[in-house]
Image (cartoon, grey):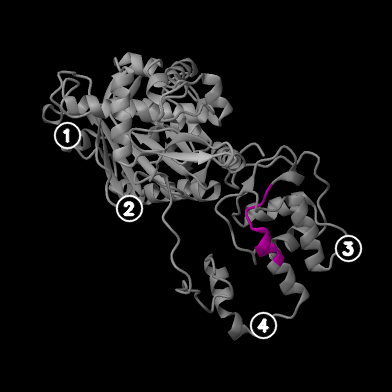
Amino acid sequence: MDDFYNSTDDVSTQDAVDETPGGRTIAKEFLSRCHRTRWVGNGSPSASELGTIIAKWAGFHGNIAAVDVITAAKELGFICGRSEHAIFALIGVNRDDVAARLAERVEPSKPKEENFFKQYAREHGLRTNGEGETITFMSATTPPPPREYAVPGRVPLRQVTLLAGAGGIGKSMVALDLLCSTVLGSDWLGSKPMPGPAIYLGAEDPEDEVHHRLADIAAHHGETLAELFANGLYPRSYFGEDMTLARFDSDGMIEPTALYYDLWKTACDIRPVIIVLDTLSDIFGGDENNRAQVSAFVGLLRNLAEAANCAIIVTQHPSQAGANSGSGTSGSTAWHGKVRGRMYLRAATKDESASTNPDLRVLEFMKNQYGALAPKVTLRFENGVFVPEMPGGSADPLVADQRSEQVFMNLLDRFTRGGRNVTDKKGTSYAPALFAKETEAKAVNLNSKALEGAMRRLFAENRIRVVTDGPPSKPRSKLVAVRP
């Protein structure tokens, strides 16, 4: 299927069989009893498939031609899917509904008063819940399931989260770092994402630039670019290409593009933990100030998040008013209202850091629908990556301790992923001695003594512990991180 479009466009009748005498009338009568869909997809039958079903419904010997089905559908205003051959064109009805119409022909209909709701819904183009007579309410027989996050306390799973930031502030780099931490199962700005695959679609930067950024992030994590891809990172640059996921027709109805359906299928195959879409202006073919369009678009993304069991993060540029107010918002208030999470990356104010570094950033968590807001994080740019900047500046002893603890935890994560077990006992596997030889420790002048102090504090804070495995005759101990 090449595209999805309204039935006012033409469908090629190449390779279609000749029209069936009376076939168009029969097809029109059958389709008039069916519910329309807003778009075609995997649940929609082809014109050829419908021709066979309609013929059976009418007691017709042979099949109704595909061209008759398409013509009848267009006359009734149904959506049709573009196809090079008419027999493959999808018609804007649902297979389950078609099966129900066929059953009505084969089996006696219910009395009119019992079928009132179905009749009313069909006449008014409404969807029904089952038979339409009852509403099924939730049950209290089971406890509510735990809330799930792609990033604990920051990014809800199966929901849409916005990441706002002015152009050039670094939001794409922060988002890419999150995806790399996700596929590596490592720390991201003081929190550990759910490990798993991740997808990045970006339209603002060419592939070479995305490549450079990922290489810098991989080096920061002590890994190679190939390791990121091998662990399930799927980046794609749409720089200079159309990345629109949905547009709106003249009646204001949302129309997903072919790319949306491609992303849907790919995400359901890959099952990523997070999808990042960079940026909103490149994927939304509507009016950002139109509440109805905003609601429909967020709903469309949420459907994708539900289907692929992932979180979706959309980057966004704030309006001038949103930047001036510190809210980071843009367009209709429906953006903030409809998404379940929202983050804002901005420049740090003078009051937020004693450092003289003019390039400090603050990642602020503006909304978490399902819990308390996470504390904001001050960031500094270091070797192509934004890393946490502790309050007070690097000369502060408390800051130095916190930084050494962060380096210790990052290196412990990397060693664990690589199957290199370390211990708290002095010897060939002594963690502080091994970590002091790594690039991350050398970059901030951390020796084994400083890392030993970090290890003691991490034990006291219950952030690391010793576990023992192996046979009783030869037990082996190793350090592991304690995660919330």
Picture coordinates of residue 463 (x, y %)?
Answer: 35, 39
Q: Nearer the viewer, mark 1 or mark 4?
A: 1
Q: CA distance from mark 4 to mark 2?
A: 45 Å
Asked which secondary structure carries label 2, the reply is loop
The answer to if 263 sits in the magenta stretch is no
Q: Which residue is label 3 attached to?
A: 61
3 or 1: tag closer to the N-terminus: 3
Determine contact: label 3, label 2, CB under 8 Å: no
Q: Residue at x 49, y 35 (%)?
A: 477
Picture coordinates of residue 426 (x, y %)?
Answer: 41, 24
Q: Amino acid at mark 2?
A: Gln
Mark seen at residue 110: 4
Q: Which residue is label 1 attached to?
A: 324
Asked which secondary structure carries label 4, the reply is loop
Q: Residue at x 47, y 21 (%)?
A: 428
Determine contact: label 4, label 3, CB under 8 Å: no
Residue 64's quadrant in the figure?
A: bottom right
Q: Amino acid at mark 1?
A: Asn
Picture coordinates of residue 467 (x, y %)?
Answer: 47, 40
